[in-house]
Image: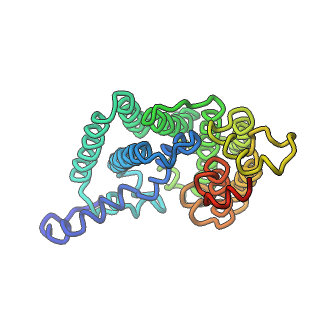
Amino acid sequence: MVKYDFTNRGPQIIWLPFWLFVSARPRQWLKNLALYATIVFEGEFFNLDKFLLTTLGFAIFCLVTSGIYIINDVIDLEKDKHHPFKSKRPIAAGRINPQIALVFALIFLATALFASVKISAFFTFATTFYAILQIIYSLFLRSIILLDVMTIATGFLLRVYAGAVLIDAHVTVWFILTVASLALFLAIGKRRSERTLLLGLKEKSLETRRILLHYPESLLDSLTMMFATATWFSYTMFTFLQPPSGAGAQVLVLFGDFLPRTFLASKWLMLSVPLVIYGVMRYLFVIYEKKEGESPERVLLSDIPLLFSVLVWAILVFFVIYGSDILPTRLIRYLQ
C-alpha cells in the first residue's frame, strides 16, 4: 500500500508541477502530430492562419491526452504497482496523491473543452468524443480482445479528422485507410511486445495486463503481418490515386522541361513509398528481433534507422508538395 506523507507538504508542492508533467507523458504528444497530417497533404502548411489554428488544435489535444493519461494512472494505481516499469510512474510510486492528480486531470480536460468550443462545433465534437472514448477505453474497452486495438486506431482517426475540420479540408478514403492501418499495426505490435516482455517476467506482472493472455501469439503474428501489409499498400494507393492538390503543378514547374511525358503524371509522392515500406519492415525487425515495440514513440526516437527513414520521408514529402515554396525563386527559374 502506497503511503502519502501529508505532514511534509512543502517538498510535495514544490515537486508537484514536475511530477504532473511526467504523469502527463509529454513523449506521447508525438501522437497528436496526426493533426498536422491534413494541412501538410492539403498543401496549406505555409498558410499562417491555418497553421496557427492547427497548432492550437495540437495544444488542445495535448491537454486532453495529458488529462486522460493521468486519469488512466489513477484507475490503474493498484495494477501499476506490480508492473516492472509502470510502478515507477509518479502516481503509482506515491509521489502524487491520486485525488490531487485527478483534480488537475479534470482541469486539463475542462480547459481543453472550453478552448475547443471557441474554435468550432465540429472540432469540439471530435475533442469531446476522443476524451470520452479514451476514458471508456481505460475503464473496460482495453480488457476486450480486439476492441482494445480498434479503439486505439479510432483515436488516431479522430485526431486526423480533428485536424481536417480545423482547416475545412477534405480527407480521402485512401488516406483514412492508411492512418487506420498504421494505427492498428502499431497497436498490435505494441500488444505483441508487451506480451513478450511480461511473459519473461514474474507471474505477478501478468496481472497488470491480463488481456495479453487472451491474445494467442499466432493471432498477434497474423494481425501484425496483415496490418503491416495494409499500411504500405494503402499508402501506395493514396500516393498514386489521390495526390495532393498542389503537388502536380509544383512538380511540373520543377521538372517539366527535363522529363518525358511518361513521368509527368503528378504522382511524385510515390517516390516516398520505398521509405514507408522500409519503415514498416524496420518496425517488424524491432518487434521480432529486438523484442521492443511496447512503446512506439520510444522506438521512433531511439531506433536510428527508423528515425532516419521517417525524417527522410518527411523531407521528401515536403519537397514534392512544397518544392516551389521551399526552393529559392532563382533556382526555380534556372530549372525552368
In this rendering, position of residue 236 left or right of residue 132? right
Q: Residue at x 52, y 40 (%)?
A: 156
Give coordinates of residue 239: x percent, y percent.
71, 39
Q: Work out whether 292 lies above or below 232.
A: below
Q: Quadrant of residue 162?
A: top left
Give coordinates of residue 126: x percent, y percent.
41, 32
Q: Residue at x 58, y 34 (%)?
A: 146
- On-image quarter of the N terminus: bottom left
Along the viewing direction, whichever of 117 and 6 lies nearer the viewer: 117
In this rendering, position of residue 22 left or right of residue 223? left
Instruction: Kindly tell me whether residue 142 is visible in this rendering.
Output: no
Q: Quadrant of residue 167?
A: top left
Instruction: Kindly tell me whether residue 80 is visible in this rendering.
Output: yes
Give coordinates of residue 289: x percent, y percent.
73, 61
Along the viewing direction, whichever of 285 and 318 lies nearer the viewer: 318
Along the viewing direction, whichever of 177 and 97 lies nearer the viewer: 177
Q: Extreme left residue here?
A: 7
